[in-house]
Image (cartoon, helix red, strand yellow):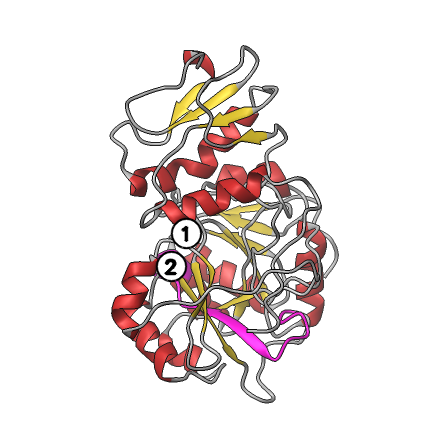
Amino acid sequence: MTAPRSTLRLGTDAASLAEAGRLLAHGALVAFPTETVYGLGADATDSAAVARLYAAKGRPSFNPLIAHVPDVESAFSLGDFNRNARRLAKAFWPGPLTLVVPARPNGPVCELARAGLSTLAIRVPSDPTARAILREAGKPIAAPSANRSGHVSPTEAEHVLADLEGRIDAVVMGEAAPVGVESTILACLDDRVVLLRPGAVTRDSVEAVIGQSVAEPETATEDNPLAPGRLTSHYATRAPIRLEATSIGPDEACLAFGPEWPAGAHPLRTLNLSEKGDPVEAAANLYAMLRRLDGFSPSAIGVVKFSRAGLGEAIFDRLQRAAAPRGAAFYDLSRI
């Protein structure tokens, strides 16, 4: 399929979702909403389609992709799920959780989508629009966030078009993503469960299901990540980000959380993730507010300090990556 000249806008009616699934099944790139963020879909069994996805995003080809399927039975057909993986799948699927498991020998997901690894990242989303498209496609769909690699992830269809207009075939113009941060990623490759990326499924809720503490990944400077979204410099705005800011400079913007603003915060360049300090509301607002603040072309974006408990761990993870120097080292998860 040749590169698209313009990006088709699709609705969320049954005929449009069927068309989205048909396009995906025939090698097209289609962005669609999930409960976490908008994903950019490609047929995970087709290396040519996956190569086009990498090119559209400008994504490093060593970074593996998540295979999305419409139901748990489809997920079990793609990978080998141990006891903990099955417990987690039963507890949290459909939902904002990705499980990394050994790929089934001779499975359908192409090597390029797995980045050459013997493992596979799998998710069953809960968003009804996403699941309808996946059913129509009839294949596992690789779907990283629908933005240029390293940019702020999209939670609205217009965010997708701002980054990828003319670079992808279609976008489903659905509602804003309610969760607002990417899925939690857990590796279940042995007796441990390793937290590769925090998200809406929190550490505490995972530990309650498996009856043990989650493990942490090794860190190194080798460019061989086991899971998506693990580059240290990621989710980046054009303006640099200052974390735990207690004051805001005259040319800076401010990302607040809770009723108190830091000294110097200007009302026209300050957005509040949640005035009542609700981490769920904050997560849903995070990416859209970062994009809006970046649009003011500030000298920097100062982010106030907030609790890292529960969902706050995922919010801080994304902000820490957005604040990292460009080209910084990333996690090497090949040894877990």
Are the residues flagged by discs 1 and 2 in contact, CB closer than 8 Å?
yes
Q: Nearer the viewer, residue 285 or 10?
A: 285
Relative horizontal placement of residue 325, taking residue 263 as reference (left or right): right
Element carrying mark 2:
loop
> Where residue 92 appears, x then y in whole percent?
31, 67
Q: Is residue 243 magenta?
A: no
Judging by the rendered image, the residue that carries numbered circle 2 is 96
Taking the spot 65% from the left edge, 62% from the top edge, the residue there is 63
Element carrying mark 1:
loop
Earlier-in-chain disc, 1 versus 2: 1
Amino acid type at circle 1 is: Thr
For residue 11, above or below residue 99: above
Taking the spot 40% from the left edge, 19% from the top edge, the residue there is 262
Amino acid type at circle 2 is: Pro
Relative horizontal placement of residue 73, taking residue 276 as reference (left or right): right
Judging by the rendered image, the residue that carries numbered circle 1 is 36
Quadrant in which the C terminus is drawn: bottom right
Residue stretch in magenta: 113-130
- Quadrant housing residue 109: bottom right
> Where residue 260 appears, x then y in whole percent?
31, 21
For residue 79, above or below residue 165: below
> Where residue 264 appears, x then y in whole percent?
45, 12
Taking the spot 27% from the left edge, 71% from the top edge, the residue there is 209
Taking the spot 38% from the left edge, 80% from the top edge, the residue there is 73
Quadrant in which the N terminus is drawn: bottom right
